[in-house]
Amino acid sequence: MLMWTDGPLCYGGDYNPEQWPEQVWSEDVALMRQAGVNLVTVGVFAWSRLEPAPGRYTFDWLDQVLDLLHAGGVRVALATPTASPPPWFSLAHPGALPVTADGIRLHHGSRDTYCAATPAYREAALRITTALADRYAHHPALAGWHVHNEYGTTCHCEHTARAFRRWLAARHGDLTALNDAWVTSFWSQHYSDWAQISTPRATQYLPNPGHLLDFRRFWSDTLLTAYTEQRDRLRAANPALPVTTNYVLGGWVPVDHARWATEVDLVAVDHYPSAVDQGAEEQTALAADLARGWARHAAVHRRSAAPRAGAAASTWLLMESAPNQIHTAGRMHTKEPGRMMRHSLAHVARGSHGALFFQWRAPVGGAERFHSALVPHAGADSRVFRETVALGAALRRLTEVRGDVEASVALVVDAASAWALRHPGMPSTLPDHHDELAAAHRVLWHAGHTCDTVTPGDPLDGYRMLVLPAVYLVDDTTAGWLRGYVHAGGHLVATYLSGVADEHARVRLGGYPAALRELLGVRAEEFHPLAEDDHVRLDDGATGRIWAETLRLSGADTVVSYTGGVLDAMPAVTRHRVGTGTAWYLSTRPDDTTYRRLLDTAARAAGVTPVCPDAPEGVETVRRRDGDASWLFLLNHTDHEQHVPARGVELLTATPVERAVTLPPGGVAVLREHKG
Ligand code: GAL
């Protein structure tokens, strides 16, 4: 199989020729060549143009587009258009329209308006997939397949309820096990027949936590089956072409991305920051580190390893990003000049084999007509297109960069914990696995450390420090995995709400966090959730937010105590030495300055040093390494000129660097480092 990662860095994005008259297509290809675009994903939402009536296919336009792209040297990730069924489908199959938890059936008029558990939808999706596979699987323009778009929809219809029951029976075996897992003795919820179980629809008061959690797991698996069905059709037509789908990130997504990673030939992620300040760069780094973590997880767990000649196992692809605007609530923020380059290179630094965008050309109409594009409404004579050309040139100069990303810290990510913490009956709505993950990542990012992300059970060799951010569900296997890490000399930093419940979201007894109590050397009796604008004071002058606990020591030492209030003088942050390893516990969320000081202390003790200890704050530094060769990415996110001591050859300007790199405000540099 020839992977996208085998060739030069990928550059391009979603190309929607169906939105434009034919005359524009040749100009598109000419502009793509000018910009150095080498990969476009075509037809993502083109179902109604490809199949205007049931079983009637109109492929002539796509034939033409693919031929044009091929002649222009642009490779194609051909999409299956199944994220947006045509109006005729919804009319013919009203039962395939999705139903919300409130029982409202949605109507056609946007995208993603289907129920992926409904046979009619799945059959129609497979039909158009097969038609595309039959016609294009051997087209010379094809580099691979892009299945669907951002799987993540759910539904509460009767088809879903039936599929859910089947899934539950397979997971739990019998009703006794299910009743036990869901603790249905509470509020008279005992099920005596499978038919009594519905999806967790809107109900009178708090829903059952086990029920909700299993529903998310069910959707992850159901959507995965919808994906693998298509993938298998496409593979059967031409096993040499890689198949993937683009992940959408966010706490709401009912997809276990780690589990999915073992079923795609290449992890592909869409990323759109939501912050306009430096939060955008923090989010970008985290998204990339997540993607790399899933790719590495897949390389370890994939049943049949996909061949990836020349590329590190942790290589992934940024499938979508925004050339320009950052979308915030109610307003689009125009990205400053140079920011598209910095965001793209941040992804490449962190293992993406290139940078793809949504979208190639800005449309005149449609819901996303003001979304940014590489060719904006202003046309090619525009700042954005000039930056597009510059980015294409930069990526070409980075062709030699390869290898894994250097990281000696890992953060644990767990989809099920994120889902379970969102149950409305938690002691507070504030704690959030992704938020806690982002806080630790942000602090480490500012301190100049590169972090990997891992899924419970992944190999931990080489990580001197491991952060466990509100990993609420810890089963016995995961508890053993963490114990093994610390006993082997690892340095673990666990935050509040880690290890409190088992895999069914049942609270573990005997004092929190029961699964980790012994390892952490602490025991919490009571939680003290804080109001959003509230904080607790710590005896080093710092503050804690979100959460606090009545914590007692059972082997650990106190590092920081609470001061004032009911928790006065009680431990807030603890450290437990276990052989040569250490297990830290944070029972509150310290402010960023304190958090950084604590993580710096833990990192120093663990022997973790920043990528570039002399780099100034605000310059992101990431190293890729392949054997003896290494490349250092330097991204200046500040408004000032910055100097970073380094030696090598700067690849973007092909300039030797003897002592230090000078980065203009917002500037970037990539060094092939000299050894020694
Ligand atoms: C993505 C989606 C694209 C486009 C984009 C806008 O999530 O895949 O189709 O809608 O968002 O930011």
Image (cartoon, rainbow, N blue to C red):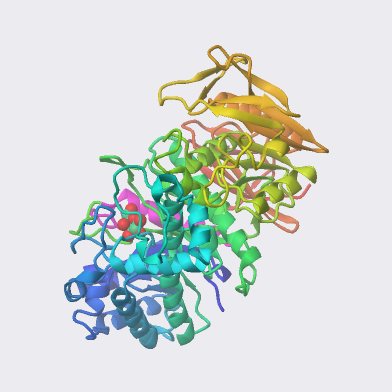
Question: At which x and y percent is residue 181?
Answer: 52, 54
Does the rendering let one see residue 383?
yes
Quick check: is 225 in the magenta stretch? no
Q: Quadrant of residue 59?
A: bottom left
The front one of 148 and 121 is 121
Instruction: Locate residue 402 relative to residue 118 in the image: left or right.
Output: right
Relative to 345, residue 124 above or below: below
Relative to 201, residue 136 above or below: below
Does the rendering let one see residue 609?
no
Q: Quadrant of residue 626?
A: bottom right
The front one of 137 and 513 is 513
Instruction: Locate residue 222 relative to residue 616 in the image: left or right.
Output: left
Relative to 546, residue 322 above or below: below
Classify the position of ligand 1 by quadrant: top left, top right, bottom left or bottom right.
Answer: bottom left
Question: At which x and y percent is residue 433?
Answer: 50, 42
Q: Quadrant of the N terminus?
A: bottom right
Question: Looking at the image, which residue is at 75% across and 43% down?
Answer: 486
Residue at the far top in the pictured view: 564
Question: At which x and y percent is residue 473?
Answer: 56, 47
The front one of 475 and 28 is 475
- How many labels were placed on the picture? 0
Instruction: Locate residue 472 relative to residue 67 in the image: left or right.
Output: right
Question: Looking at the image, which residue is at 29% across and 40% down?
Answer: 329
The front one of 276 and 274 is 274
Question: Looking at the image, which residue is at 26% across and 40% down?
Answer: 331
Relative to 316, residue 286 above or below: above
Quick check: is 390 in the magenta stretch? yes
Question: At which x and y percent is residue 339?
Answer: 42, 44
Q: Which residues are magenta?
A: 371-399
